[in-house]
Structure formats: structure tokens, C-alpha cells
Image (spheres, rainbow, N blue to C red):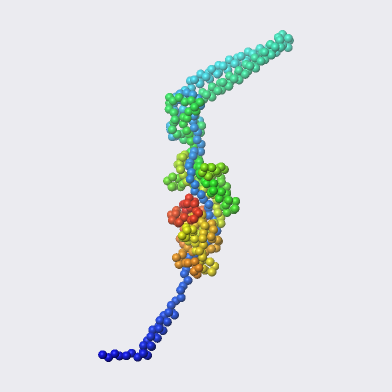
Amino acid sequence: MRVERVPFRLISAATAAILLAACGQKQSAPPQQTPEVGVVTVQPTAVPVTTELPGRTSAFLVAQVRARVDGIVLRREFTEGTQVKAGQRLYKIDPAPYIATLNNAKATLAKAQATLASVTAQANRYKVLVAANAVSKQDYDNAVASQGSAAADVAAGKAAVDTAQINLGYTDVTSPVTGQIGVSQVTPGAYVQASAATLMATVQQLDPVYVDLTQSSLDGLKLRREVQEGRLKTSGPNAAQVTLILEDGRTYSEKGKLQFTDVTVDQGTGSVTIRAIFQNKDHVLLPGMFVRARIDEGVNESAIVVPQIGITHDQKGQPTAMVVGADNKVALRQLVTTTTFGPNWVVDSGLKAGDRVIVQGTDKARPGMEVKAVDAKLPPVFASDAAATSGASAAAGASEGAASSAPAASGAQPAQAASAASGA
């Protein structure tokens, strides 16, 4: 068999051609491009400071109708659960004994008045006679003393008549206030006593209505410190608006106002009581209902807000954000967040005005890497400038689901985060 030999010169030429082609392909490969990321430039934003607190409703006025005289209840003159007016008669107690007592007091007064008239006439006669030495000075003095005693008897008689009339009036048991009356505690034929202050019924005024809230003394201390430092602006406790959330999760239609904050801290719970007042024309709020109140305590005019999609958490649960510096290099920042404002986190520290936070393309960025920063194209609900211009109304219109899906920030109170996310 014959084997043809290939000249070495041909092999060398072919190999050189292949190598030159490979080198040409390597030299023609495009250079690696700088990754592009979407950033948001943070600026100070006016953010309302809100607190969500639990509480219970209580009536504006509570009047317990109790017996003020002893006697048998003859009849009840109201329907349970209805509105009654101040001065409306509710019960009638047997007045017969008190009518007799009044008549006796009147008779005693008439007798005392007659006696006074007699001794007064005698004292006047003795006055003339003693001047003519017709009677002794002692007899005249006795007549004047008798006149004074009779006058005192008349005054006591008048007081007895007044007392008898008052007690007779108490047999008509009336409502002390206008409001809604509850269950009758006595029935016709029952015996009531003034000494035992027998409870007969309760009348409650439900429009307006109070809401008693409980706030920890620590939260109150933080609020007062921020106001003193000028970070928060408030128009005073009497002007603070309160939004009420009912037991079924719905928001009450009327806005309330804070009445006062108790100055005494409960030693057992470490909390103070805050009272708010709400109009209740339709009687939706009933005494004893459990509610949650969202209080607008002030406005932080220099808050730094960052869209939630721009904040992640490290293995320790600390919130972090990637920032593009002036040299277009990425830096990782540790943040301290407090609460949410609509779809944004409120950052207390770790960022300053003008920082460019990466909110899009975070998977392509690494600390120390050089990137190309462009303005992020976010949905309107995530745009931070919308929050800055719309103020508190933007928070009210924000979706609850957007805020609740974000992980909780370290150190943030869940109740405050939930309140702000639901439209604080």
C-alpha cells in the first residue's frame, strides 16, 4: 500500500492560517459594556407622623337614674332602648306618703305664722306700755324673745314645706340628660330606697362619643423630643386629626379630634391615656366597642423616603441599599428605617439628600462596580416625587398590599408600619 506524504511546508502554512484566523476573531470581540441601572435621587419630603393605637369607646355623658325617695314604683313611662329628653318622666313612685307629709308641713307652718302674729302684737303693745312704766322691763323683754322664737318657728316651717315639696317632686323620676336609655332595672310594684340609692335605669348620650386610647410613655417621649428638636411640626393636640378604624376593618366616616393627653403614667403598664372625641349622629359607635385610632401627630418636613423595591435586607435583617456615588461606582449603605409612607420606606439614617439609590437593575450591580446610572422608570405609585408633592393625601391613597408585602425594617414598630401602609 502506498502512503502519500504531505509536504511539511503545506502543514505549516495551514496551521499558520488557522492561528491567524483565531487571533483575528479574538481581536474583533466587542469590549464589555458598563451595566445600566435605574436610580432614584432622594430628596427631603414632608411625611405625616402617624400612630395607630388601640382603644375603646365610651359615652359622652352617662347618667345613672337612682331612687331619691323610698316608695313603691307605680308605673314606668318609657320604652327601653329609646331616646329620652332631659326632664322627661321615666317612673312614678307612690306619692301618697309625701303628699301627707307636705300637708302636715304646711299646717305646722300656718300654726307658726299664727303664733308669730300673736306674739308680735303683744311685743308691740308692751313696747308702748314699758315707756309709760305700765309693765315691767322684764315682761317686755320676754315678749320680744317670744316674738323671735315664733319667727324662727315660721322659718323652720317654711323649710319643712320646701323639703316636703322636694321629696314629693322626687316621686316623679325624670331623666337628668338627653340620651338613649337602656334596660329598666325595676318594674312596677318594686320597692326602691333612697338610702340604698336603688339603680333604676341608665341614660347615655352617644352623640358625640369619646374614644379612650392607650399609648406607651416611650412613644410619647419620642414624639415630644422630635417636636422640641424641630423635626416635627404640629398645630397642637386639640387640632390633631384622628381616624377611627372599626372592628370590621372599615374606616369611620367622621374625623375626630384629640381632647387631652393624661399627664400620669400608669405604673403597671407604663402607658398614658389619650382621649379623642367623634361625632356619632347615626349611633354607629356604641359604648364599649373596641376600635383602633390613627392619630396624625405632626409632619416631618425633612424625611428621606425610598421606594420599597430599592431596599433589601442582609443576613442579620438590617435594611440596606445600593447607592451610586459621584464616581459612578456602587456602594452598599446600612440604613435605619422607622416606618412606611405609602409605598416608600422612611429612612432615619444611612442616606442623605442627593444620594442616588438603585431601584432597578440591582441584580446587575455589585459594591465597587462601575455602573451607568439613569433615572428609574417607576409606576406612579412608586414615584418618590409623587409622595413629596401630594403629602398626606398620597399616603391615604396608597395600596395597603404594597406596604404589607415589604419586609419589616429593623427597629420599626409593626403597628406604626401597618398604620402608615394602610393610608396614614
Question: Can residue 253 be seen in this snapshot?
Answer: no
Residue lying at the far left in this picture: please name it: 1
Image mark count: 0
Identify which residue is drawn at 53% across, 54% down. Answer: 47
Identify which residue is drawn at 47% across, 39% down. Answer: 287
Q: Quadrant of the N terminus?
A: bottom left
| Residue 403 locus on image (x, y percent) | 46, 55
**Which of the two residues, 265 or 363, is positioned nearer the viewer here?**
265
Identify which residue is drawn at 51% across, 50% down. Answer: 50
Question: Can residue 415 be seen in this snapshot?
Answer: yes
**Which of the two residues, 185 or 108, is positioned nearer the viewer here?**
185
Identify which residue is drawn at 38% across, 84% down. Answer: 18
Q: State whether residue 345 is above or below residue 275.
A: below
| Residue 231 locus on image (x, y percent) | 57, 54
| Residue 251 locus on image (x, y percent) | 46, 47
Q: State whether residue 186 is above or below residue 342.
A: above
